[in-house]
Amino acid sequence: MKIWIKRLALLVLALILAGLAVCAYIMHSAKDSVPVLNYHQINDRDENALTVHTDQFEAQMKYLADNGYHTITPEEMIAAWDNGTALPDKPVIITFDDGYADNYRCAFPILQKYNLRGTIFLISDFIGTYPNYLTWAQVDEMQESGLIDFESHTLSHEQLDSTSPEETWNQLDGSKKALEWHLHKEVNFLAYPCGSYDEELQQMVKKAGYKGAFTVNFGLADKGENHYILDRVPIFGCTNHTLMRFKMRMNYAPIFAPLARLHKDMYESGHTFIARFIPTP
């Protein structure tokens, strides 16, 4: 009996060591990848999966500043990859989708406080139109600060893999031209509305003149990845955005991202019981 217990203990230990070795290999393989953080709303009013409270957001930004992270833009990331130049140590991209008014009221002052740069993907027809979205004056002020870059989230947030080719082109090309006219700069990147895309859409994005496009797929942006389906680290999906959860999702994305995909696949295929046991921060 004692022999079997020893053998079982050795087997468990071997499995643990093998798991740690696999995790170490995965983390080492991703050492040159870039975490692209994905936010939406930053406020203390809403209690939904897209909102991070202001104090939680500030704690996350303070963590980045205190731990030597360097904020870059999508343009700088792609340029470094294409030209073979080095990125700064511990690069990170902070992105916000949609262009909510609280990005100006709540997020922008915190980014200023810690001298961190961000990128906001704008729904161009919504700017200056709806009260919950940014105004062009706010956009101009943030752009002039040198801390905020603006890119495209289409004209009106249509799910582009289900629209007609004519409407898809209108959303891509129209938003790019409208933003370039307002911002007086090139707009080279897109965030897919609802994170939805297919092969045909990727080709249209490229044809419209964009250099890359971002999904909401959990993972790090990697040089070897298709530039038109770049992964991000979603900082949403629950109403409890603790600093520990933030650290785990950002620092260990190469490990947790495959588990998150497995959890989603299990859940969508009806295997909810199994999905409960898959760790996904």
Image (cartoon, rainbow, N blue to C red):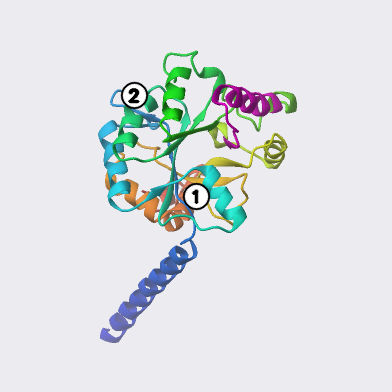
Task: Provide the residue span drawn in magenta.
Answer: 169-190
Residue 232: in magenta span = no
**Number of marks present in the image shown:** 2
Element class at badge 2: helix
Residue toward you, 191 or 183: 183
Residue 180: in magenta span = yes
In the rendered image, which quarter contains the N terminus? bottom left
Main SS type for the magenta part? helix
The residue under label 1 is 261
Can you say whether 39 is above or below 132 in the image? below
Give the residue at x 41% y 57%.
89
Which of the labelled discs sits on residue 88, or is there none?
A: none
The residue under label 2 is 105
x then y, percent, for residue 105: 34, 24
Residue toward you, 260 or 100: 100
Amino acid found under the numbered disc labelled 2: Arg
Amino acid found under the numbered disc labelled 1: Arg
Residue 118 appears in view: yes
Q: Are marks 2 and 1 in contact (CB under 8 Å)?
A: no
Among the 4 quarters of the image, the one containing residue 93: top left
Give the residue at x 39% y 40%.
235
Question: Crowding near pointer 2: few (<14 within 10 Å), some, many (20+)?
Answer: some
